Amino acid sequence: MAFRFEKPDNDGKTGSLFSSGLVSVVVHALMLTIAGLTFRGCEKQAPAQAGGRDFREIGIATVPDASIPTDSEQTQPQENSEDQKDEQLTEETVSEAIPSEIPNVNQLLNQNGDSRAQNQTPSENLIGAGLPESGLPAGGSIPDLIRPRTGSGPAGSLTPGPDSTSFMNIVSSGQSFVYVIDTSVSMGGGRLQLAMSQLKASLRMLKPRQTFQIIFYDSSSRTVKLRNRPEQDMYPASDLNVLLAERAIDAEVAGGGTKHLPALMRALRLEADVIYFLTDGTTGLTRATLKEIREANFHGTAINVIEFASGAQESSDVSWLQLLASQSKGKYNYVPVR
């Protein structure tokens, strides 16, 4: 039996190579498809938090420090400093700022004398008496400079009793007090300074249950306004109200003419227990006007009168200021000043 070997033709070899190549392409395509589906599945997952192990985009995460203010917080406009101070004031914070005692009048007068000596202008080249001085002691010993008029009763105590206060060494008791202060141009210089320092001292002696009002006047009258407080006819004498009143007092300056009657009538309408009336009395009131004041005093308010005048009192005649005090059962003080 004879065997015969036949050489394969080229067509068979080509078909075999084509089949194996097709299988390889299909396998690789399948692998790429599986890899693509896996990659898209990772992308669809929610991004992980900073520091986690899940798939996420590469970046830097920052956590703000709560202790460092932001730019908007740093650039907020500040309110007016004076308003902030007034809003922060309470009865507790101001109680320590108000002295518990009335200052000695004699000490104040000594301080005025010292400052006057330091600022005195040489007068050897001046003709006449020289430049006038105001608000200064006109003579006499220091204890006698401010004293009640003879026969007016004791009024020099610096330690008033319960429900009492003292103004220019006139002590009065009551639950409501009105201070009527002349601020006309003739009260300039040391006169007004002395009046205001004693006014503040008198307010400090009041108790919170008592009330007060201050009327400043020249050619017109005006009541005191307490900053950031509702306007009232009479203010309770709390520590805070007294401190705010002192600020308003410091803002007053002397100027203008003098009209006593409108200021006194305004004070009487408040129906207080006591009125302290301070003036230099440069213009007087007639007896008819004094009668008008007496008839308007329905409440029976006591009117204490303090007169600032140049030099020692020489005339023995009763002045209109003395009549005003006596007809209202008040006290009268003559204060000699230059």
Image (tube, helix red, strand yellow):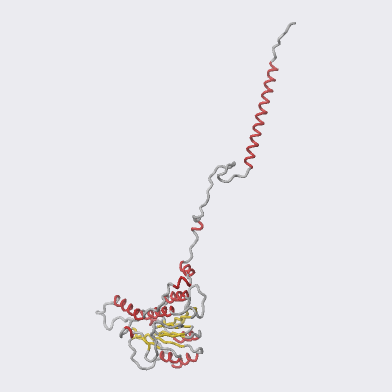
Residue at left offset 51%, top offset 88%: 299
Q: Nearer the viewer, residue 81 or 145?
A: 145
**Residue at the far left in the pictured view:** 124
- Classify 226 as above or below 290: above
Residue 120 falls left or right of residue 183: left
In this view of the protein, can residue 180 be seen by the observer?
no
In this view of the protein, can residue 208 be seen by the observer?
yes
Q: Give x and y (percent) for residue 61.
A: 54, 47
Q: Give x and y (percent) for residue 278.
A: 41, 84
Residue at left offset 40%, top offset 90%: 153
Q: Give x and y (percent) for residue 213.
A: 47, 80
Classify the position of the N terminus by image quarter: top right
Residue 4 falls left or right of residue 137: right
Q: Give x and y (percent) for residue 19.
A: 69, 23
- Classify 177 as above or below 33: below
Q: Nearer the viewer, residue 121 or 88?
A: 88
**Residue at the far front in the pictured view:** 162
Q: Nearer the viewer, residue 196 or 273?
A: 273
